[in-house]
């Protein structure tokens, strides 16, 4: 099966909002080749399928952050309507509301993108943990070496010349 879009193309469409990984209604509408208004209508008609942890309306501040972060949302700047944010489950639920063959194919690719995004996050967390463990080991080795050097320095007699003083001549 030919992928409509590569998974990596979806990564830039996934945002962190309110602790969720979400996609914005305008991006989803563009992917499904429909108007944002029509997408929102389907969600409103089927509201029982979209609880708050599946889809939520962004706040004014969140909308401003999206506009500042992405040029493609510039048209939202002066809009009186805040965009809707769809979590992974909300995007999956869209496939039951939008039934065109294109919508099904796009949903499959979006689900793959969410899985890929999660894998990247897990890999980065594992890498971060390993780096911290190595850093701690290196710090311990350096501390051990510094302690050894300090102890040796205290044991060693000073090396060098001493100037004779009148006391030494007596």
Image (spheres, helix red, strand yellow):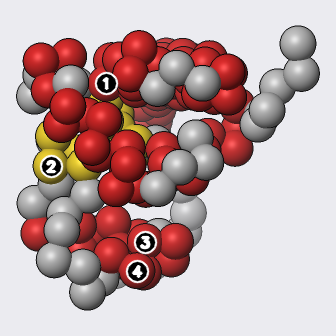
Q: Which residue is mark 4?
A: 75
Q: Secondary structure at mark 3?
A: helix
Distance from the alpha carbon under mark 3 to that under mark 2: 15 Å
Tell whether label 2 touches label 3 (CB within 8 Å): no
Q: From the top left corner, tell me how far across and down residue 94 is, in percent.
A: 40, 24
Q: Viewed as shown, does residue 52 lie left or right of 134?
A: left
Q: Viewed as shown, does residue 166 lie left or right of 115?
A: left
Q: Which residue is mark 3?
A: 73
Q: Which residue is mark 1?
A: 90
Q: Secondary structure at mark 2?
A: strand
User: Which residue is painted at 89% across and 21% down in the image?
Assistant: 2
Image position of 134 with respect to 20: above or below: above
Tell whether label 4 touches label 3 (CB within 8 Å): yes
Distance from the alpha carbon under mark 2 to that under mark 4: 17 Å
Judging depth in this view, the residue of 89 and 161 nearest the camera is 89
Q: Which residue is mark 2?
A: 57
Distance from the alpha carbon under mark 1 to that under mark 3: 21 Å
User: Which residue is painted at 19% across and 63% down in the image?
Assistant: 82
View extreme (right): residue: 2
* Sooner in the amino-acid sequence: mark 1 or mark 3: 3
Q: Viewed as shown, does residue 50 lie left or right of 3?
A: left
């Amino acid at each position: 099966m030919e992928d409509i879009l590569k998974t990596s193309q979806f990564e830039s469409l996934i945002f962190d909002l309110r602790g969720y990984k979400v996609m914005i209604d305008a991006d989803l509408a563009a992917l499904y080749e429909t108007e944002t208004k029509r997408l929102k209508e389907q969600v409103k008609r089927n509201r029982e399928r979209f609880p708050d942890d599946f889809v939520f309306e962004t706040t004014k501040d969140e909308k401003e952050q999206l506009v500042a972060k992405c040029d493609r949302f510039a048209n939202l700047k002066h809009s009186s309507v805040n965009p809707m944010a769809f979590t992974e489950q909300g995007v999956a639920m869209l496939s039951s509301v939008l039934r065109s063959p294109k919508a099904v194919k796009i949903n499959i690719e979006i689900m793959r993108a969410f899985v890929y995004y999660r894998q990247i996050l897990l890999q980065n967390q594992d890498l971060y943990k390993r780096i911290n463990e190595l850093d701690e080991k290196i710090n311990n080795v350096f501390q051990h070496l510094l302690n050894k050097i300090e102890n040796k320095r205290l044991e060693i007699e000073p090396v060098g010349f001493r100037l004779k003083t009148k006391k030494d001549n007596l």
